[in-house]
Every structure is written in structure tokens, then in C-alpha cells.
Image (cartoon, rainbow, N blue to C red):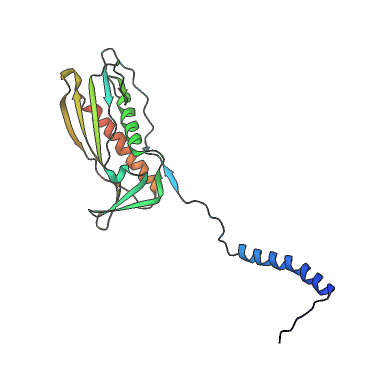
Amino acid sequence: MKTTTFLSPASKALCAFRAPGLLAALLLAGCSVLPAPTADPTRFYLLQGTAKPPEPATAAVGALRIGVHSIQLPPYLSNNRTMVVRSGVNEIRYEDYARWAEPLEAAVLHAVRERLLAAGGIATAETPPFSPDVRRDLDVTVRVLRCEGASDPAKGNTAQFEAVYEIADLRQNGQIVVRRDFKPAAAEWNGTDFAQLAAKLGDAAAALGNDIAVNLPR
């Protein structure tokens, strides 16, 4: 037999008063289990060495006009801006919270061009797109092989940079007159300070620009 319960008007009013309060309590309880917001730990770094950037040198009459082509990177470096640490020969680790502030190709190109302009005897160092109305004497092509940190149980942590470059003499129908490997000694790195790693790689990129300037045919 079904039993029906009747509420008095006063009881109905009390339930209506309590319902919004109960709903609010449930909502507050649900909100309290959400995690508190945290700061983004990602840090962004420039490929800038420890030395002060040099001032452009004053170009003499008859100074060289150089074209510096876009920097070529291996795919594991060019596909993203995440800084890389190599472990052993074949293993690499992408540091999700340590990133380059600009494309690495552009950063290396800037470092090389800056050093070329600071070297004596160079009038201009043009970058793509090249103007057909501007005469160039030499073209420089750079392929970076390594630009990363390295962690080795035997050798410790280091900053490693390696590149190859070619210089074409446009005064001789574009003949390749210089082909050179550039591999400076690995610089010691503490393994955790990515600002330090960026600075040491920046020093290496600047040294690459200096090496190119020294080997330009006159």
C-alpha cells in the first residue's frame, strides 16, 4: 500500500530555504578540489656569448661584399626551439622547459654576420633574400652539425658546437675556394644552468664567424 507524506506549508518553506544553501555548499566543495594555479617554468634563452658584441668596422675602399646564406641545421635541431642535451652517441633529450627565444638558424646567422662586419676589409654582409642589384664578391654557406649540451659519465657535461662552411668566389664563376670544418674544443657546462649553456654556445657561434672572416680569400 502506497503511503503519501504531506508537508505543511511551514515545512515546505524550510526546504525551499535550505536548498540553495546546500547547492552552494556542494559547489564550493567541488571547487576546493581543483589544483591551485602554478607559474609556467619555461625559460627562453638567446644565443648570445659572454663577450660584448663587437662594433662594425669601417670599410675601406675595395672592401669585400659578402653574402651569407641561410644557416642549415640537422632536423633534430631545426624542427623546434627546445634546447637539446645529447647523452652518448645516439640519445638526445629535449628540455621542454628550456627553449630558444628565436629560431636557432636566425640566431647563428646573426652571430656570424655580426663577426664578419666587425672584421676589417668587409664592406657588407648581406643575408637572403639577396638583391640582384647588389654585387657580391663571395658567398658563405654554413651547415651546423651540433649546437647542444652533452652529458657523458666519463667526460662530464659540456657545450658542443660543430659546423662546416664553404666560401664561393663569385668573381671566379662561383667556384668553391674554401671548405672548412669548424669544431672548437667542448666547453665545460654544469649540466643544469641553461643560461650558461646558451652563453657557451653563443661564444662558439661567434668564434665561427671569426674563423670565416680569417679564411676569406682577398
Q: How many marks?
A: 0
Check the image and name the residue furthest to the bottom.
Answer: 1
Q: Nearer the viewer, residue 67 or 15?
A: 15
* Quadrant of res 124: top left
* Quadrant of res 114: top left
Check the image and name the residue furthest to the front.
Answer: 1
Q: Is residue 88 left or right of residue 173?
A: right
Q: Is residue 177 left or right of residue 144?
A: left
Residue at 27%, 19% in the rendered image: 65
- As displayed, is residue 205 above or below residue 22? above
Residue at 38%, 31% in the rendered image: 53
Q: Quadrant of the N terminus?
A: bottom right
- As displayed, is residue 17 above or below residue 119? below
- As displayed, is residue 61 above or below residue 2? above
Residue 160 appears anywhere in the view: no
Residue 179 % position (x, y): 17, 32
- As displayed, is residue 200 above or below residue 94? above
Residue at 81%, 70% in the rendered image: 13
Check the image and name the residue furthest to the top.
Answer: 61
Residue 22 % position (x, y): 71, 68
Residue 208 % position (x, y): 27, 34
